Amino acid sequence: MRTVKRPGSRPRFSPTLCVTHACNLNCVYCYQKHDSQTRMSFETAKRCIDWIFNNVPDSMEGIEIGFIGGEPLLEFDLIRNVISYVKSIKHRHNYVFYATTNGTVLTEDMKAWCSAHRQDFVLALSIDGARETHNHNRSGSFDRIDLDFFLQTYPEQSVKMTLTDYSLPRLAENIIWLHEKGFRNIGGVNLFEGAFDWDKPEYLSILKQQLKVLSDYYVTHPDIPLNQMLDKHLDLCESKLRERKKWCGIGDGAIFFDCDGTRYPCPFASPMSFSKEDLSAMLRTDFKDANEFIDEECHSSCYIYPICPTCSAANYLTEKTFKLRNKSKCNIQKVIALFIGDIVARRIIHNPSLFPKEKLFYTIQAIKKIKVLYGYLLN
């Protein structure tokens, strides 16, 4: 059964089952190696499910089981059978299933089943914006997606967007288009990963123009939640005791089961993205030791460290270690922080009651410091 996560409650266990390596698209930023033959059997899936329900970490509460590919809905019958299997067994954990899809293979039968089971199975859509941008990034697939199905069946579910050099000059246009279309929550505005220098001056210049437009939009539409790129708690930057923790659940909370049932640290840290040699070296890591994932330079000297997102597996892809962050995004994250400060400051002026009193002072202090430290990037 699906439950709502309570504020302050323990994190959920979030394992993922890779049901297929196949995908029907060829997105420009995809880091996975696809093949049409590798898929998970029902017997393997049941063994994975049994392991999951018997190995929920004590520090976690409830289970979110993800299905991933490739395109996971290519194995829709398997997904349906796995969910039926979980419903048939006795266990003490609350759970919910989810998958992220490109939306192109949904049949009427699938839509009907999803609608009937939406309390147990959540489907998120990957969409990079309006038709032109989406078609460039995602194999011309825009017109094969039933947007109304997602809006009507999962109205509160966020969509996911990946940002490329092509879509960067259209960032504001595409995010505003998604909001105006009816998608209130945009849970992923991710810079695509790999050996790509996002800190080039021309990209920063374009980003600043786009964020200015978005800043004005969000200030004049205060009822719309900030997208994931801009939804950061600036007050955390003022913390005197900076936590030493992983940014994500790699190795413990985000276990990944490949099609053959082999466990890996997370969906990114898997054979679809890394060589056997890299994975072998990776698996020698003590994933319970947060120090293995902390870039000491960033932790000790970067003011926005507490709100600067990072992907441990993506860091390993470029740095061959979890302990160093990919620094090609440093300036772009500082520019983003400046515009978060601008949006929050203007929202505070218009309606300070929107912000908890205990956080308001530290938020204002953080806005001031971010402007002093990084304001030169706006010149």
Image (cartoon, helix red, strand yellow):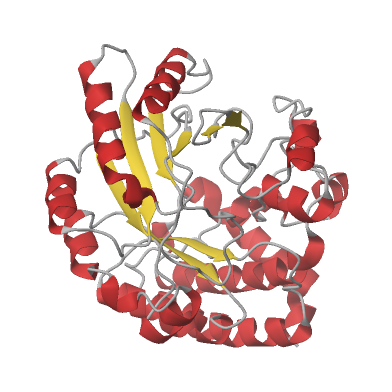
- x then y, percent, for residue 176: 38, 79
Which residue lies at the image location 42% right of the left edge and 40% below the top edge? 19
Q: Quadrant of the N terminus?
A: top left
Q: Quadrant of the C terminus?
A: bottom right
Most foreground residue, 161 or 340 = 161
- x then y, percent, for residue 126: 40, 63
Which residue lies at the image location 44% right of the left edge and 72% below the top edge? 128
Residue lying at the far front in this picture: please name it. 37
- Specify the quadrant of the image occupied by residue 185: bottom left
Q: Is residue 1 visible?
A: no
Most foreground residue, 310 or 72 = 72
**In this rendering, position of residue 235 left or right of residue 293:** left
Q: Is residue 326 visible?
A: yes
- Residue 238 to residue 162: above or below: above
**In this rendering, position of residue 222 left or right of residue 191:** left
- Specify the quadrant of the image occupied by residue 332: bottom right
Which residue lies at the image location 57% right of the left edge and 74% below the top edge? 342
Mark count: 0
Which residue lies at the image location 34% right of the left edge and 76% below the top edge? 142
- x then y, percent, for residue 212: 55, 84
- Residue 170 to residue 60: above or below: below
- x then y, percent, for residue 108: 13, 58
